Image (tube, rainbow, N blue to C red):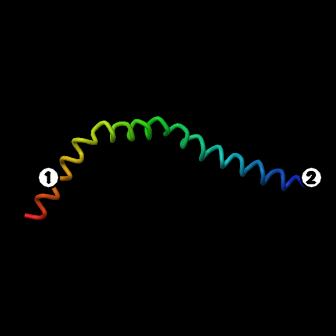
């Protein structure tokens, strides 16, 4: 195996690890945002309905 090929492959894995780590760490924040959205869904639809009513009058 060519050493430069090994070096390139290892640097690709290092880049993947640098990008994947923060993405995995943000999963709890994403889940909290989704749960919060559906928890407040009734309030959000009421606000949207009121705003739409104001546009049509």
SS at mark 2 in the image = loop
Left or right? Give the position of 21 relative to 33.
Answer: right
Say few, some or many: other residues with alpha carbon within 10 Å of mark 2 (under 14 / 14 to 19 / 20 or more): few
Which quadrant would the C terminus be assigned to in this image? bottom left
Q: Which residue is painted at 18% across and 53% down in the image?
A: 49
Count of numbered tags: 2
Above or below, 4 against 33 in this view is: below
Residue tagged 1:
50
Q: Residue furthest left?
A: 57
Cα distance between the residues tagged 2 and 1 = 67 Å
Disc 1 crowd rating (10 Å Cα; few below 14, some 14-19, many 20+) is few
Q: Residue at x 66, y 49 (%)?
A: 15
Residue located beneath label 2 in the image: 1
Percent across and percent down for residue 18 are 62, 45
Secondary structure of residue under mark 1 = helix
Q: Position of residue 39 (x, y in %)?
A: 31, 36
Residue at point 13%, 63% (across, down):
55
Return the x and y of residue 47 as percentages of the image width and height. 18, 48
Foreground pick, 26 / 32: 32
């Amino acid at each position: 195996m060519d050493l430069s090929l090994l070096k390139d492959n290892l640097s690709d894995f290092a880049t993947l690890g640098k990008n994947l780590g923060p993405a995995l760490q943000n999963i709890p924040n994403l889940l909290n945002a989704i749960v919060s959205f559906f928890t407040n869904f009734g309030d959000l639809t009421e606000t949207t309905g009121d705003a739409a009513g104001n546009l049509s009058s």
